[in-house]
Image (spheres, rainbow, N blue to C red):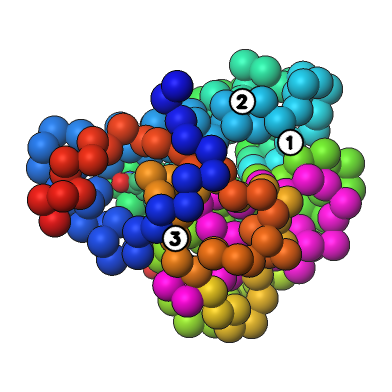
Amino acid sequence: MDYIEENLDEIDPMKMKALENKAEKSGISKLLLMENAGAKLAVEIIKKFKDIKNKNIIIVCGSGNNGGDGMVCARHLCNFSKSISLFLLTSGELIKTKENKTNWQIIKQIKSISIYEYIDDEKFFNKFREVSESADIIIDSIFGTGLKGSIKNPASQIIEIINKSNSFKVAVDIPSGIDPNNGNIQDKCVKANMTVTFHKSKPGIKNKINITGEVIVVQIGIPPELENQL
Ligand SMILES: NC(=O)c1ccc[n+]([C@@H]2O[C@H](COP(=O)([O-])OP(=O)(O)OC[C@H]3O[C@@H](n4cnc5c(N)ncnc54)[C@H](OP(=O)(O)O)[C@@H]3O)[C@@H](O)[C@H]2O)c1
């Protein structure tokens, strides 16, 4: 078995970042970790929905590595579902990380995925409202452990639309808006039905089932000895 369900061992976000850096130094690149994370996330979604090919799926991506995990997931899911829409909550030029930029360049070439890039407020929000009305699954890869301060637009408004939707919501690593260290919600937060978190759970999502839904921990290929060396 290459994944563990309900493994509630925790790692705090600072230690997780240090571990990712350690993994990179040992030759496991952050791009490879992102690929593993997005692919494992797709597997969990496919396992959850037996009729995945008939599902309308939205992936909402932020500008950091959490967004990159969502893009990888979208690429893996496009072999299983014909209806995938990806909303990027920034313009492609403003994507923050190298790994997310790489995945954006790849995903832009996939014609079977409908891609919407944030440029203009009203058009973007209207499109998101329209597509989310018929969505069966919304994947929240807006913010993971890198959220700082109160949530700015467009993410703020998009989170409100996601929470009003009747779709099944999947949070990537943690629900966007929750503090990964202590579980505090500064202003708003995605309310998920399922949270797929990477390597180990995070302290801020412990006992928060109303916000996280079911928590599933997936392994992304970081060997335990690297953690013992931190
Ligand atoms: N590559 C890896 O090694 C690896 C492995 C496993 C998982 N991950 C994933 O990477 C995630 C962490 O990625 P990350 O550190 O890049 O952080 P992130 O969670 O993706 O969030 C950072 C992004 O959010 C934006 N942001 C932060 N606060 C905001 C606010 N209040 N309002 C609007 N935008 C805001 C930042 O933009 P500004 O800078 O402009 O504020 C930045 O682009 C994890 O949660 C996990 O999902 C990565």
How many numbered marks, from 0 up? 3
Name the residue that disc number 3 marks.
202
State the SS at label 1.
strand
Between label 3 and label 1, give the one nearer the viewer.
3
Q: Distance between the residues labelled 1 and 2?
A: 9 Å
Is 170 left, or right, of 137 in this rendering?
A: left
Could you tell me residue 89's position as x and y percent? 58, 57
Cβ–Cβ below 8 Å for labels 1 and 2? yes
Of badges 2 and 3, the one in the foreground is: 3
Between disc 3 and disc 1, whose residue precedes? 1
Some atom of ligand 1 lies within 8 Å of the CB belonging to the residue at label 3? no
* Residue at the spot of label 1: 57
Q: In which quarter of the image is residue 209?
A: bottom right
> Where residue 107 sits in the image (x, y, percent)?
51, 31
Q: Quadrant of ligand 1?
A: bottom left
Against 88, residue 39 (above or below) is above
Q: Can residue 128 be seen in this view?
A: yes
Q: Give the range drawn in magenta.
A: 159-182
Image-quadrant location for residue 17:
bottom left
Give the vertical position of 135 relative to 183 (above or below): above
Give the residue at the far top of this rendering. 79
Tell me, for residue 77, which label it has, or none.
2
User: Does residue 89 show up magenta in the picture?
Assistant: no
